[in-house]
Image (cartoon, grey):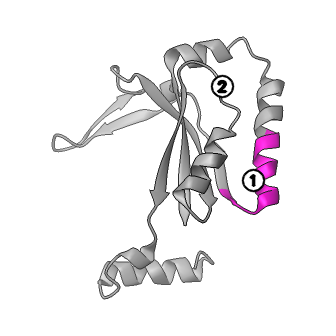
Amino acid sequence: MKYMLIMRASDEAYAAFQDVDFNEIIESMGRYNNEMISAGVLVAAEGLDDASQGVVVDYSSEPPVVTDGPYGETKELFGGFWILDVASKEEAVEWAKRAPMSGPGMKAEIRRVTSIDEFPQDNEWIQKERAWRVATGQL
């Protein structure tokens, strides 16, 4: 089963990291990622650029409205993710507990990644996506 570990942090947590040497952050994340690589559970991992550099697309109107940066009322921001291929949610939780993300306002959300096999296989769009996944080596 695949699980996504989503790195989340409050504004205060991001502010606290301003004082931490970036090389220390890279070192601790590198060690953590290497443990997962060595264990054979890491599928993907990416960090995200500062939320102020992104845009938000709001679909509550037609046409959708695009605004700069994150929602103003955001209390926590999504900062990056890992995708793990593990046997259970409990194993994903154990890996998340080892992430180098200590401190107030730092969290990891764990969500199972659904498989294409869980969707109706007789659906034309699922068949097209399956063919694309096979062609790109994802299945």
Give the residue at x 41% y 27%: 70
**Residue type indicated by callout 2:** Ser
Report the quarter where the C terminus lies. Answer: bottom right
Magenta stretch bounds: 30-43
Report the quarter where the N terminus lies. Answer: bottom right
Q: Is residue 128 left or right of residue 49?
A: left
Q: Position of residue 109 (x, y in %)?
A: 49, 41
Q: Position of residue 5 (x, y in %)?
A: 56, 46
Among the two numbered marks 2 and 1 on one chain, the one whose residue lies closer to the N terminus: 1
Give the residue at x 39% y 84%: 127
| Rendered image quadrant of residue 120 | bottom left
Label 1 secondary element: helix
Neighbour class for label 1 at 10 Å: few (<14), some, many (≥20)? some
What whole-number distance in Å separates the C-alpha atoms at marks 2 and 1?
18 Å
Please identify the dominant SS of the magenta region.
helix
Label 2 secondary element: loop
Tag 2 residue: 102
Neighbour class for label 2 at 10 Å: few (<14), some, many (≥20)? few
